[in-house]
Image (tube, rainbow, N blue to C red):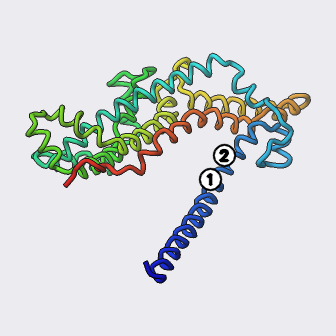
């Protein structure tokens, strides 16, 4: 090895280290910018209402207080019940939606399905036009009779054309040779789907599954429309009502003279919102580390050789 080759190798190695260092610094800065707001939310949730009103938000708690969390968990069994409703809806909805959307995407991706273009247009058309809120509400309550029914929370998010297109693009990237090889080995369509296609869809299943889980976890609008029984409230809508009730009560107190004004000022509102944010986002944010590794995996790595 001559000196020029050795020097070139050292230079390339040094350039790679410098590039890695710049990448780490840049990505670390972006991560820090994204993390700071969440730290401020957690900090504000442990601060007193007076401190937030006087000095604003900060990275560290000001006048440490658990009053906001005491208000949130004043009735712990109601919180537990709302959590249970949301967790069950998220789990069941995510699994059923993944199954339905994967099967639909598989059918639409098959070139030997003669009607795939027509069905694809039908799904795409629904993203451009809809009947509006009033017909939708009448359909759910007057015809399907889903008022105060958990199906009213489950069905609206069960199918997404956007997620369908993502899943379809992943499936279409699978080489046709794998499908044909499965057929030659005697596999039917369902066996091909579950034994060949599904194992190769881990990145897509993780990505779309996370989207669906977030949609179910954050959904409060469906509960506002169709659920009037407070024992059936999901977590998001229960906490939404709690904030609105406290703010309304505070305005009533502020409208009266005397001791009510002081009581209203001391009631947690801003810190309560921050505490509710922590309570709501805490569990679902733990899902991301479980699916992160699948984002960077190739869908067909090692599937076809030679």
- Which type of secondary structure does the marked residue at label 1 adopt? helix
Identify the mark at residue 55; answer none if there is no mark. none
- Which of the labelled discs sits on residue 38, or is there none? 2
Mark 2 is surrounded, within 10 Å at the Cα level, by few (under 14), some (14 to 19) or many (20 or more) other residues, namely: some
Is 229 on the left-hand or right-hand side of 107? right
Residue for point 54% across, 35% down:
284
In-image side of 168 versus 153 (left or right): left
User: Residue 205: which quarter of the image?
Assistant: top left
**Residue 69 place in picture, x, y as percent:** 73, 29
Q: Position of residue 159 (x, y in %)?
A: 34, 37
> Residue at left 82%, top 33%?
65
> In terms of image quadrants, where is residue 96?
top left
Callout 1 touching callout 2 (CB < 8 Å): yes
Q: Residue furthest right?
A: 258
Check the image and report above or below for 280 versus 19.
above
Work out whether residue 293 or residue 224 is closer to the camera in this orientation and state it. 293
Residue closer to the observer: 86 or 156: 86
Q: Which residue is mark 1?
A: 34
Q: Position of residue 104 (x, y in %)?
A: 24, 39
Residue 180 position by quadrant: top left
Badge 1, how many Cα within 10 Å: few under 14, some, many 20+? few
Residue lying at 37% horizontally and 35% vertically, measured from the top left: 136
Which of the image's four quarters has the N terminus? bottom left
Q: Residue reaching furthest front?
A: 1
Where is residue 287? Give x, y as percent: 51, 37
Which quarter shows the C terminus?
bottom left
Judging depth in this view, the residue of 105 and 271 nearest the camera is 105
Q: Is residue 224 left or right of residue 282?
A: left
Q: Residue at point 64% right, 32% down?
A: 279
Give the distance between the C-alpha atoms of the residues marked 1 and 2, in whole angstroms.
8 Å
Say what secondary structure mark 2 lies in: helix
């Amino acid at each position: 090895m001559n000196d020029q080759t050795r020097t070139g190798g050292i230079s390339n190695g040094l350039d790679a280290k410098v590039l890695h260092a710049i990448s780490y610094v840049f990505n670390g800065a972006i991560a820090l910018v994204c993390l700071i707001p969440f730290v401020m939310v957690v900090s504000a949730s442990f601060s007193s209402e007076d401190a937030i009103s006087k000095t604003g938000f900060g990275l560290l708690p000001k006048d440490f207080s658990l009053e906001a969390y005491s208000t949130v968990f004043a009735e712990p069994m109601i919180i537990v019940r709302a959590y249970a409703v949301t967790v069950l809806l998220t789990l069941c909805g995510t699994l059923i939606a993944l199954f339905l959307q994967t099967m639909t995407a598989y059918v639409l991706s098959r070139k030997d399905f003669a009607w795939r273009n027509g069905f694809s247009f039908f799904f795409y058309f629904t993203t451009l036009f809809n009947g509006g809120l009033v017909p939708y509400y009448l359909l759910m309550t007057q015809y399907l009779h889903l008022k105060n029914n958990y199906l009213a929370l489950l069905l609206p998010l069960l199918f997404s054309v956007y997620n369908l297109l993502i899943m379809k693009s992943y499936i279409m990237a699978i080489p046709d040779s794998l499908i044909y090889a499965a057929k030659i080995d005697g596999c039917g369509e369902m066996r091909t789907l579950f034994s060949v296609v599904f194992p190769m869809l881990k990145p897509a299943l993780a990505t779309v599954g996370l989207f669906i889980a977030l949609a179910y976890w954050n959904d409060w609008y469906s509960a506002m429309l169709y659920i009037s029984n407070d024992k059936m409230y999901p977590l998001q809508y229960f906490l939404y009502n709690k904030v609105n009730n406290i703010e309304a009560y505070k305005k009533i107190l502020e409208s009266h003279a005397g001791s009510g004004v002081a009581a209203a000022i001391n009631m947690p509102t801003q810190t309560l919102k921050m505490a509710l944010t922590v309570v709501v986002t805490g569990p679902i944010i733990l899902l991301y580390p479980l699916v992160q590794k699948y984002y960077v995996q190739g869908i067909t790595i090692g599937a076809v050789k030679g």
